[in-house]
Image (cartoon, coloured by chain):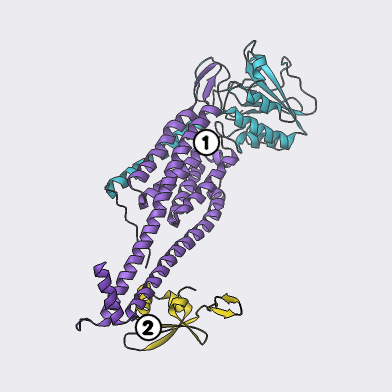
């Protein structure tokens, strides 16, 4: 007694079903390709942040430590992953980095921000200060247009990095941005000082544009 | 007894009949397992589809541009791509239960669901456990090639992503070609043990069927060894009753 | 079964470890348990139907019906 193929008693013949299965497989693969195209599309191209810390900024830095400022839309689902990655960064570099998370807010909406889960998640990270950014003033000052955009200034106040810290929209895991920030904080030289930002637009001026990754 | 029929011929014919019945019992048992597993997966695939839509609507319902919101791509992915992943395998489970094509399509669909759920949850490491759970469920078929289909699908997805968008998976710009193997290695680790388990289960089913054939053969022998008078009396009683 | 005083218990039949089979020409050959179980099913069934397989545990003869239970 050996292993014989078990016969199906279905009236539907094999060849058409085989072709259907092949077409189905290709369609699903195409669907995943389309999903990845979306997830890897960066947010709007950012303006370049000031090369040294702008004195007009309302954000106070502590001397002698690097400062990371991250701009977020309070309801952007993709920024959840950014906040998770910020937590990983802070766990690794909490002793040499101050972090601020600024949430875009219209005038009068500041109180509502504290009720969002993104605000709560960011506020729970040790070493992170969370604050509203009324009318997106600071975001514009630092050239941030996409939720999840981060700027890193070293201890001397010089711009060291500008960009995102996730590898795709709403996707946790290692990224170019994290590697480059880590290189700066460990005294190394990153290959680039920027990374694409994946998230929702911070302001409702203009449509979402495909951004180019600029090397400074 | 008919003098032209040798005793050995009747024994051979009886043996053929016993073996044939054993094969039929084995096939029926295996078919039951395959069909019931197909049904289980059909229900699971639909359940995952419903869960994915709920997840997308709860976790990421909108994309924002300032104050302007649009339906998030995750919602469309859950409904449309999730529906595409689910409909064909469920149809096959209903139209061709127990068929070879059905369970391989289901295996591919289940791993596609792992990939989609990982997308919908933002690549959370916990969601990756769905891959290992799915492989264990596929072992219910007791048909190890099905596990290979699942492994190839999930490894192929990593390989494709690694080649086309290396940063998305490994976080480095130029991964060595073998990096996808590091991710696949853990999958292979569990698949090896699941394949061994499937083969053992299959062997156990075959042994059970053969043991039944042996016991039937013993009964046949005992009947043959009973006296001619007893047999005639038993046949007569059977004709009357 | 055996009875001692008031107690009756089933005698434990040892598992067979060898089989002597007789082919159609009457020729005998001895097989280990493993070798017998590896024979094609049809061949084993033929021996059992024809009563041409004898089962032993060491030197002790085991009835076929008991041997197939173990």
Question: Residue C43: which quarter of the image?
Answer: bottom left
Separation (CA) of disc 1 from disc 2: 66 Å
* Residue beneath the point at 46% across and 49% down: B150
The residue identified by callout 1 is: B119
Q: Is residue A160 visible?
A: no
**Can you say whether B27 is above or below C38 in the image?**
above
Q: Colour of chain B?
A: purple
Instruction: Give the numbered dot on residue C52.
Output: 2
Supply the letter of whichever chain is yellow.
Answer: C
Residue B3: x %, y % from top left? 20, 84
Quadrant in which the N terminus of chain A appears: bottom left
Vertical placement of residue A99 versus B235, above or below = above
Q: Quadrant of residue B33?
A: bottom left
| Frontmost residue, A171 versus C39 | C39
Can marks 1 and 2 be said to lie on one chain?
Answer: no
Q: Pick the residue in front: C15 or A66.
A: C15
- Residue A197 is situated, as x and y percent measured from the top left of the image, at 58, 28
Residue B113 seen from this side: yes
Numbered disc 2: secondary structure: loop
Q: Looking at this rendering, what residue extends furthest in the top direction?
A: A108
Tell me, what hue is chain A? Answer: cyan
Q: Is residue C9 left or right of residue B226?
A: right
Task: Work out whether residue A116 or residue B163 is closer to the camera in this orientation and state it.
Answer: A116
Please tell me which residue is depicted at 40% across the width and 57% down the height of the picture: B30
Query: Where does residue C10 sit, x and y in percent of width and height?
Result: 54, 75
**In this picture, is A37 found above or below B139?**
above
């Amino acid at each position: 007694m050996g292993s014989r193929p078990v016969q199906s008693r279905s009236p539907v013949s094999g060849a058409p079903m085989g072709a259907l299965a092949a077409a189905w497989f290709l369609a699903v693969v195409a669907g995943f390709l389309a999903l990845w195209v979306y997830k890897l599309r960066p947010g709007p191209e950012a303006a370049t942040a000031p090369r040294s810390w702008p004195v007009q900024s309302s954000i106070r830095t502590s001397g002698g430590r690097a400062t990371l400022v991250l701009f977020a839309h309070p309801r952007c689902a993709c920024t959840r992953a950014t906040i998770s990655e910020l937590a990983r960064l802070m766990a690794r570099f909490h002793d040499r980095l101050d972090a601020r998370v600024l949430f875009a807010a219209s005038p009068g909406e500041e109180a509502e921000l504290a009720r969002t889960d993104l605000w709560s998640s960011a506020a729970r990270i040790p070493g992170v200060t969370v604050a509203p950014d009324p009318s997106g003033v600071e975001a514009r000052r630092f050239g941030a247009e996409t939720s999840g955009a981060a700027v890193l200034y070293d201890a001397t106040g010089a711009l060291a990095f500008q960009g995102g810290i996730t590898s795709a929209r709403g996707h946790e895991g290692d990224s170019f941005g994290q590697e480059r920030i880590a290189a700066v904080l460990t005294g190394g030289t990153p290959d680039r000082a920027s990374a694409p930002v994946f998230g929702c637009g911070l302001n409702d001026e203009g449509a979402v544009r495909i951004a180019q990754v600029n090397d400074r | 007894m008919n003098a032209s029929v040798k005793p050995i011929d009747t024994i051979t014919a009886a043996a053929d009949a016993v073996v044939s019945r054993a094969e039929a019992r084995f096939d029926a048992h295996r078919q039951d397992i395959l069909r019931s597993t197909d049904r289980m997966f059909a229900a699971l695939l639909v359940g995952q589809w419903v869960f994915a839509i709920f997840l997308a609507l709860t976790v990421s319902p909108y994309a924002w541009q300032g104050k302007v919101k649009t339906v998030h791509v995750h919602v469309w992915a859950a409904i449309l791509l999730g529906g595409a992943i689910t409909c064909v395998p469920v149809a096959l489970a209903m139209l061709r239960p127990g068929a070879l094509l059905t369970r391989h399509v289901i295996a591919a669909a289940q791993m596609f669901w792992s990939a989609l759920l990982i997308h919908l949850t933002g690549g959370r490491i916990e969601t990756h456990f769905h891959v290992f759970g799915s492989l264990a469920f596929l072992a219910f078929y007791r048909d190890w090639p099905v596990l290979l289909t699942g492994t190839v699908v999930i490894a192929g997805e990593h390989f494709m992503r690694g080649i086309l968008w290396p940063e998305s998976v490994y976080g480095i710009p130029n991964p060595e070609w073998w990096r996808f193997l590091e991710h696949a290695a853990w999958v292979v680790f569990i698949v090896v043990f699941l394949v061994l388990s499937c083969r053992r289960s299959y062997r156990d089913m075959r042994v059970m069927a053969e043991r039944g054939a042996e016991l039937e053969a013993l009964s046949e022998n005992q009947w043959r060894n009973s006296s001619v008078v007893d047999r005639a009396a038993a046949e007569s009683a059977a004709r009357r009753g | 079964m055996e009875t001692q005083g008031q107690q009756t218990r089933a005698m434990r039949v040892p598992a067979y470890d060898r089989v002597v089979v007789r082919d159609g020409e009457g020729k005998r050959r001895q097989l280990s348990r493993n070798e017998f179980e590896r024979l094609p099913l049809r061949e084993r069934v033929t021996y059992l139907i024809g009563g041409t397989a004898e089962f032993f545990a060491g030197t002790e003869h085991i009835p076929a019906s008991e041997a197939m239970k173990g």
